Amino acid sequence: MATSNLHGVGDLTFDSSNRRWPNEMNVLLALILIIGIFELLGHLMMGQSFLFDTSDRSTSIFNEQRLRIIILQVSIVGIIAIGVTQVIISGGIDLSSGSVVGAAAMIAMSFAQVAEVNGNANPTLALGPWAADLPVLVPIAVALLFGLLAGIINGSLVAYTGIPPFIATLGMMVTARGIAKWWTAGRPISFPTDGYRAVGDGLMPVIIFVTLAVLFHLVLRHTVYGKHTHAIGSNEDAARMSGIKVGRHKVLVYTIAGMLAGVAAIVLSSKNLTAQAGMGVMYELDAIAMAVIGGVSLSGGRGSIIGTVLGALIFGVIISGFTFLRLDAYYQEMVKGGIIVAAVVLDQWRQRRAAWGP
Amino acid sequence: MTSSNTILETVGLTKHYGGVHALEGADFKIHAGEHVAIMGDNGAGKSTFVRQITGVERPTRGQIIFNGASVTFENPMEAREVGIETVFQSLALADELDVPDNLFLGRELVRFRLGPFSILDYKAMRQRTMEALEKTAVKIPNLKNTIRNMSGGQRQCVAIARTATFHSKLTIMDEPTAALGVQETAQVENIIRTLKQQGESLILISHNMRQVFDLVDRIVVFRRGRIVADLRKEETDPQDVVAYITGAKTGAEFQDAAA
Ligand SMILES: Nc1ncnc2c1ncn2[C@@H]1O[C@H](COP(=O)(O)OP(=O)(O)OP(=O)(O)O)[C@@H](O)[C@H]1O
Ligand SMILES: [Mg+2]
């Protein structure tokens, strides 16, 4: 009976047990399933476990080394994905983040160099001695500022010129990569200060990723900013009619995404102890893939940071699983591509089903 | 000046879209507590009229007087702030958000202010939503459902409940029951009666003659962008109204307007 689940006059309830199965649970199940597949293949093909520690001497349950590699691997792109997630939820797309990482890394690193290496002048000094041995806050501020500018330009183009986000950020993608190459005419920049090294040292990338993920999870769930981001991606006209300043909000969303790309640039160049013009190539696509795998809908309005983090883990597990099985990197790419397409198809299917009713 | 209890008045309100004269010199008046229907054929300019008085669009010409003062609304929010709540023909709901989110979209309740990062007060919004739905006797299965998962009737009810959540001086509904079944239509009509009891003014746009004669005090007929009749319910009947809508008849005082 269709009306049996309706509450009549004055009989309204808020039934939290009646919540819908959250989409993140599906992503989590997919993650577990994929780990299971690699476990199985590991036992069949390699005679060893993928994620668990099976050696007799060991005291831990998990193969900590592999876990660490997986998480470390996805952390830096994961930081970008946090921003990309917000852009996609708002109904946009950001193709520029990988290039922004490259340019921001180059520029930041040139303010993070030591003057002397083993008593000799730093051979890769990009800007001259005046920019050497600066406090670590300088390169950090520079990278964030570059990300901020790139984001403001992206956001303003999208919000005020009517250029589709795909094209606007494609322009930034090419431009920022150009800046990265032009900065030192293609030469790498190396030998950062101790302060700068510390930023991306050891498990720092993971700590930064997790901290930012928690922060933006809370921001998206519990602030007006988050609500409006979802609303704009869901129905831009409705958002506008409700008095939301849609243009201004979009600029803010892209700016946050740009700054997160700046953070990724800092962590990446610090971890690698060098910056190169080619840094971050294809990161934008990996970040979008993480979000999409995590259930962020490319048509906007739907998705969460938790989903994206799970998507990032799926991503990391697959890459490290292929390495574990000693399969070619070519297969990795192919499977990665397949998974992205599958995730988008799944999203489309989910939407159509929702449109037709349960 | 107009009589003191006139809540909204338009003088010579006109809207041209390029060469399309969608609205031409509309003189309209509604008193506090009065319920007025706007009727007219498709394309007669009813929705256009609504868009001008709610700040969605800027009129080409003409004056809007609200509560005795001349106003120009830059956007729908400004109209809302002075107390005009509107259910637009296109519902203006965010599909991926749930009921309280939609009710409070653009005017969220917050626990403390931090600019765009103000912290939402979900509990208060849920509470007020339940009150609003109770007040309007709207049936919604679960407040946490997103709009996407609701039927057309439920969506309409949410859009209407949104106007009822906030105490308004004037409520405008553009064809609120056009896509509804019998039960949902009755529900919406009940909401309208509740508004009447509470003394709130209403402009109801509808093609449904029975409904209009059931609910309102006065009927204003639009034809080809112009007001062609202004009829008290007691002094007219459905056939008469149809004659005005189709152009078979034009009100004496509007003769020159329709010429
Ligand atoms: N944005 C626009 N640009 C150009 N013409 C428009 C625009 N909006 C409306 N019109 C035209 O103005 C006229 C009045 O349209 P309006 O939507 O006000 O009609 P309506 O009386 O609400 O009709 P319906 O009963 O079908 O909702 C129509 O001829 C329509 O095509
Ligand atoms: Mg209309």
Image: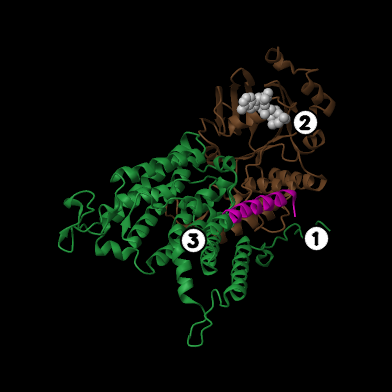
> In this structure image, what is the colour of chain A?
green
Q: Secondary structure at mark 3?
A: helix
Label 1 neighbourhood size at 10 Å, few (<14), some (14-19), many (20+)? few
- When the figure is inspected, residue B225 is found, relative to residue B194, above or below; the finding is above
Discs 3 and 2 share one subunit:
no
Mark 1 or mark 3: which comes first in sequence? Answer: 1
Q: Is mark 2 within 8 Å of ligand 1?
A: no
Q: Chain of mark 3?
A: A
Q: Chain of mark 1?
A: A
Nearer the observer, disc 3 or disc 2?
3
- When the figure is inspected, residue A299 is found, relative to residue B23, above or below; the finding is below
In three-dimensional space, the C-alpha distance between marks 2 and 1, rounded to whole angstroms, equals: 39 Å
Q: Chain of mark 2?
A: B
The magenta stretch spans which residues? A337-358
- When the figure is inspected, residue B259 is found, relative to residue B35, above or below; the finding is above
Q: Is mark 1 within 8 Å of ligand 1?
A: no
Residue matched to label 3: A218
Q: Amino acid at mark 3?
A: Leu
Residue matched to label 2: B233
